[in-house]
Image: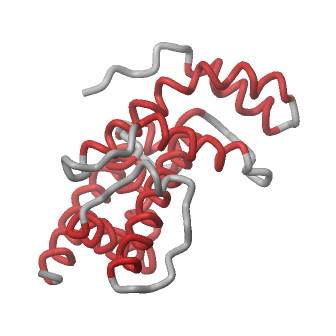
Amino acid sequence: MDSPIPNDTNQITQQLIAWSNGDQTALDQLIPVVYQELRRMADRFLRHESAGHTLQPTALVHEAWLRLIDQTRVNWQNRAQFFGVAAQMMRRILVDHAKTKHREKRGGNAVKLSLDEVINLSQERAADLIALDEALESLGNFDRRKCSVVELRYFGGLSVEETAEVLSVSPDTVMRDWKLAKAWLYQQLGEGK
């Protein structure tokens, strides 16, 4: 397992809150502090991709960072919430690209993304990623919390305790949701084959 970010969690939380309150110097101080963890998250995401892709973790981090700093209505509460949102954005970037590649294969007019020149998902991997995204969307339609648990734990790499903090539930609830969500997704993805 990756080691946790070496910087003080309270320091990150304080900088996030200051940034939410309009302090741009807090944003400048935050960048080097969170970059390493964002990089680890990108590595985890890309570990699940096919062996032949060319997307580098740095490109995924940069795209996610651009989307994160563009968030004007987020009231950052803590480190776990920030990295949870970052995980959702990284997942969305990969899914959007997979959908674009899937449309290109079928002859549709693809929307050009900034990552087009660096990502090369295989068509099979793109279809798997789209199927997972659709299953997560379906899960989220009837149980948003279980979907959030999957996003935060699997994609975000958050611990049970961090996930519980973000969702304002107990660690036991996170573990129950995690087990049920995994079983449900396994069944859904198995039915599609």
Q: Residue furthest bottom?
A: 107
Q: Is residue 56 visible?
A: yes
At a point 56% along the width and 54% down the height, the residue shown is: 114
Q: How many marks?
A: 0
Judging from the image, the colouring scheme is secondary structure
In the rendered view, would you say 128 is above or below 158? below
Q: Position of residue 93 (x, y in %)?
A: 49, 57
9 left or right of 117 in image: right
Name the residue nearer the viewer: 53 or 96. 53
Of the 4 image quadrants, the one containing the C terminus is bottom left
At a point 46% along the width and 52% down the height, the residue shown is: 117
At a point 36% along the width and 69% down the height, the residue shown is: 133
Q: Position of residue 104 (x, y in %)?
A: 39, 77
Rendering quarter of residue 107: bottom left
Q: Position of residue 61 (x, y in %)?
A: 51, 39
129 left or right of 187 in image: right
Q: Residue furthest right?
A: 22
Q: Position of residue 1 (x, y in %)?
A: 24, 27
Name the residue nearer the viewer: 65 or 37. 65
